[in-house]
Amino acid sequence: MKPMEIEKRSFEIIAEELGERKIDPEYDLLVRRVIHTTADFDYYDNLCFSEHAAKVAMEALRAGCPVVTDTTMAMAGINKRALARFGGETHCFIGDADVAEEAKARGVTRSLVSMEKAARTLGPAIFAIGNAPTALYSICDLVRAGKLQPKMVIGVPVGFVNVVEAKEVIMELGVPYIVARGRKGGSNVAAAIVNSLLYQMIQREE
């Protein structure tokens, strides 16, 4: 089978297995894209959204809003051509030498410092966090200090330590969010969410 045929059949299987379960139309394609990426139907229940989160995120992307990730894997997974179509770019500062040096000097994670650098250098952005709960906590601190106002926080880090708690804090922060509640997530999920939004935007133009 060709790649497009495999994807088409995959989404048919997802529809069959979802059965009578309903998804809010605003998030339907997004949830299905995440399930397709992970083969995990738990995301039907896990994904949580602030009011009109998909619409808010797409408006930001359409305006050329940059997308900041906490890992190079998440950045690699985002469709750059689709993002560039709307004037946007991806950024990941985790590997920058100045970030590593500052994190070591302060005794904190590079993820935390990389969010601070994003706030200084980019301003408002979409943050797609798939790995580091410390990145979410850093975003929270920056927002509370008046140093950052994210257009959207995609909070889907995976793991066992501080992951659940960090996601709950984001949901109480008062900023637009798309969160995978609980332990599940990952860089691939963060990228899939961004790509789903971009693909929907492109489909509406064609």
Image (cartoon, rainbow, N blue to C red):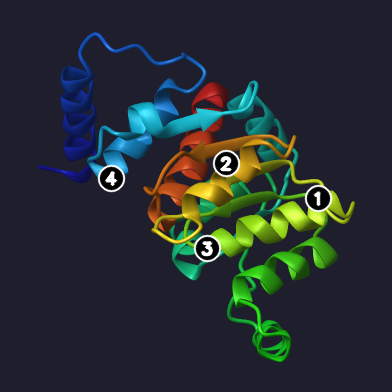
Contact check, label 1 and label 3, Cβ < 8 Å = no
**Label of residue 132 in the image:** 3
**Amino acid type for the residue under numbered disc 4:** Thr
**Amino acid type for the residue under numbered disc 3:** Ala
**Which residue was labeled with disc 1?**
143
Between the residue at mark 1 and the residue at mark 4, the CA separation in whole angstroms equals: 31 Å
Mark toward the start of the polypeptide (1 vs 4): 4
Mark toward the start of the polypeptide (1 vs 2): 1
Residue at x-position 76% and y-position 67%: 116
Mark toward the start of the polypeptide (4 vs 2): 4
Which secondary structure, mark 1? helix
**Which residue was labeled with disc 4?**
38
Mark toward the start of the polypeptide (1 vs 3): 3
Q: Nearer the viewer, mark 1 or mark 4?
A: 1
**Label of residue 168 in the image:** 2
Q: Nearer the viewer, mark 3 or mark 4?
A: 3
Residue at x-position 45% and y-position 61%: 161
Q: Nearer the viewer, residue 2 or 12?
A: 12
Contact check, label 4 and label 2, Cβ < 8 Å = no
Contact check, label 2 and label 3, Cβ < 8 Å = no
